[in-house]
Image (cartoon, rainbow, N blue to C red):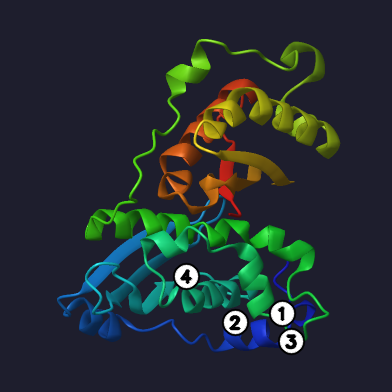
């Protein structure tokens, strides 16, 4: 990743140099002393970066919105500015509200002007840091016990294994990482259409591949999947396992931009 701050928006540069929500160990202890506090840790894919998040829920016990959230991290440079923006935008959302949070909002928030993007390629190289959002959501679901009104069945790996069809001959064309980006996109899209979409369409949802980088497949959940908590936990895990099996590559990671 390019760590040159000058290539990004002034707002991102400011947050990277003086983040609003990054705090010390002392502040962390103060927050954790509150009876309505929460805490979780996350390691970013394909990097040595990690983050420790801690915050306080608001007074609404039915929805548990995030009243205040701070963090500690070893991430530096432009990514730190992105992380700080993500944390800022998590405020006032509850676990359900985090389902509708997208990387596009982060990019828009970091713009200096509406007509100029703040991050190259809509922030594609920063998707790994945005994954703290679904992780945070899953943790809040567990802490608060908040569930959606309609119970939906997450796709099971057994639904895939009984009808697996490989879309390529690995012996002839080599491993996934050696393919061109266009061919990678073509195969990943076919796998999603055959093995994943039919499962999600049962509940009025769907999925699409929106970006590929290194060993990361960035997907976008559509329809009902965009507001379903399972999309960011068990369904995302199902998709990862299917792609790893079909592509014969255990290093494949999945990120959501939904």
User: Which is more toward the observer, 257 or 179?
Assistant: 257
Label 2 close to label 1 by CB (< 8 Å): yes
Between marks 2 and 1, how big is the CA–CA gap? Answer: 8 Å
First in residue order: circle 3 vs circle 4:
4
Which residue in the structure is indicated by mark 2? 16
Which residue in the structure is indicated by mark 1? 5
Is residue 215 visible in the rendered structure shown here?
A: no
Between marks 4 and 2, how big is the CA–CA gap? Answer: 12 Å
First in residue order: circle 2 vs circle 1:
1
The quadrant where residue 201 appears: top right
Which residue in the structure is indicated by mark 3? 112
Residue 85 in the figure: left or right of residue 108 = left
First in residue order: circle 3 vs circle 2:
2
Between marks 1 and 4, how big is the CA–CA gap? Answer: 17 Å
Residue 132 in the figure: left or right of residue 207 = left
User: Which is more toward the observer, 6 or 117?
Assistant: 117
Between marks 3 and 2, how big is the CA–CA gap? Answer: 15 Å
**Label 2 element class:** helix
Residue 153 pos. (x, y %) = 39, 33
Q: Is residue 204 above or below residue 195?
A: below
Residue 85 pos. (x, y %) = 55, 77
Residue drawn at point x = 64 percent, y = 74 percent:
78
Label 1 close to label 4 by CB (< 8 Å): no
Choose mark 3 or mark 2, whichever is in front: 3
Label 3 close to label 4 by CB (< 8 Å): no
First in residue order: circle 1 vs circle 3:
1
Choose mark 1 or mark 3, whichever is in front: 3
First in residue order: circle 4 vs circle 2:
2
Between marks 3 and 4, how big is the CA–CA gap? Answer: 26 Å
Which residue in the structure is indicated by mark 4? 74
């Amino acid at each position: 990743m390019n760590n040159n701050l000058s290539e990004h928006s002034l707002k991102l540069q400011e947050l990277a140099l003086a983040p609003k929500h990054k705090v010390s160990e002392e502040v962390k202890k103060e927050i954790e002393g509150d009876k309505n506090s929460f805490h979780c840790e996350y390691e970013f894919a394909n990097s040595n970066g990690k983050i420790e998040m801690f915050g306080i829920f608001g007074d609404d016990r039915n929805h548990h919105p995030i009243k205040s959230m701070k963090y500690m991290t070893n991430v530096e440079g432009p990514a730190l500015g992105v992380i700080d923006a993500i944390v800022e935008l998590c405020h006032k959302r509850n676990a359900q509200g985090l389902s509708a949070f997208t990387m596009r909002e982060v990019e828009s928030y970091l713009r200096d002007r509406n007509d100029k993007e703040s991050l190259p390629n809509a922030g594609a190289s920063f998707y790994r840091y945005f994954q703290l959002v679904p992780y945070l959501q899953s943790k809040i679901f567990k802490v608060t016990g908040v569930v959606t009104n309609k119970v939906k069945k997450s796709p099971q790996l057994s639904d895939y294994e009984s009808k697996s069809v490989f879309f390529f001959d690995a012996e002839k064309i080599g491993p996934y990482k050696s393919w061109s980006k266009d061919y990678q996109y073509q195969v990943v899209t076919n796998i999603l259409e055959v093995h994943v979409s039919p499962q999600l369409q049962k509940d009025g949802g769907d999925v699409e591949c929106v970006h590929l980088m290194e060993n990361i497949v960035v997907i976008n959940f559509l329809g009902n999947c965009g507001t379903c908590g399972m999309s960011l936990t068990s369904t995302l895990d199902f998709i990862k396992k299917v792609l790893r099996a079909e592509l014969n590559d255990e290093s494949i990671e999945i990120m959501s931009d939904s």
